[in-house]
Amino acid sequence: MRSGTRRKWSGASRAFLALAIVLGGASFLIVRTYSARVDALAPALGPSLPVVTAARDLVRGTTLTGEMLKVIDVPAGYAPPGGLHRVQDAAGHTLVSDVAVGESITRTRIGSEHAGPIASLVPSGMRAVTVPVTTAGNVVVGDHVDVLATFGGGQPHTETTASGLEVIAAASGDDASSQLSTDGGGSAATITVLATPSEAESLAYAGAFATITVSVLGADEGQGSST
């Protein structure tokens, strides 16, 4: 009996072996081609740069802190214009627009370092006006409201003082700070709205001589409102 019997490969086994060799060679060529393309693009994309991004979804009016931010490296060719490169460049500033998680924090998305949380949200030519209200229900930051003034005296009446004003802050009666509120919890004693200078005068007059209430615009109306 011979001890060195030579195993014979079936036709199917030889076919699978040949296919594996072909696929392996093709995979090698694909990876090598991709690597060559990446190397060729590297000079055009430039070196990596650190970019400050949002670590979670952030809303307009948020004062940024370090834990809200994350630094990632991106090719210089993909770095956003005005992008910030260090967390300390953004921390302490106020967001002037909503930012989704992973989005870059740029200089156009934050207020001036010399402006407070409210001033950072006021566009040029507009004013932030704090309006006392007897009840605000569930008015939250970002809502748009009509301000109604009810005058007493010999001819009591109610009139619309200003329409479609954006709410940028809300404070409850026992909240002495000017922190922005977005949760809508409880009734608010004051709201801060964006208004034109003439609207600001009308609101001041109504606040001095009338009882102020607000009506909230629907979402579609609010998006189409401009102050």
Image (cartoon, rainbow, N blue to C red):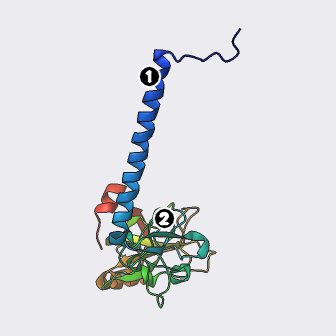
Type of the residue with mark 1: Ala
Type of the residue with mark 2: Val
- In percent of width and height, residue 187 lies at 56, 65
Between circles 2 and 1, the one closer to the viewer is 1
Image-based side of 191 in relation to 76, left or right: right
The image quadrant that residue 18 belongs to is top left
Which of these two is toward me, 82 or 202? 82
Q: Which mark is residue 140?
A: 2
- In percent of width and height, residue 158 lies at 35, 69
Image-based side of 43 in relation to 50, left or right: left
First in sequence: mark 2 vs mark 1: 1
- In percent of width and height, residue 7 lies at 59, 17
Tell me if mark 2 has few (under 14), some (14-19) or many (20+) residues whose alpha carbon lies within 10 angstroms of its own. Answer: many
State the separation of the CA atoms marked 2 and 1: 70 Å
> Vertical placement of 44 versus 216: above or below?
below
Image-based side of 224 in relation to 18, left or right: left
> Vertical placement of 207 versus 181: above or below?
below
> Vertical placement of 15 versus 227: above or below?
above
Tell me if mark 1 has few (under 14), some (14-19) or many (20+) residues whose alpha carbon lies within 10 angstroms of its own. Answer: few
Which of these two is toward me, 98 or 102? 102
- In percent of width and height, residue 161 lies at 33, 74
Q: For mark 2, give the secondary structure.
A: loop
Residue of label 1:
15
Kindly identify the residue that appears in the image at 43 percent across and 82 percent down.
Answer: 111
In the rendered image, is residue 165 in sight? no
Kindly identify the residue that appears in the image at 47 percent across and 91 percent down.
Answer: 114
Give the quadrant of the C terminus. bottom left
In the rendered image, is residue 92 in sight? yes
Kindly identify the residue that appears in the image at 42 percent across and 35 percent down.
Answer: 23
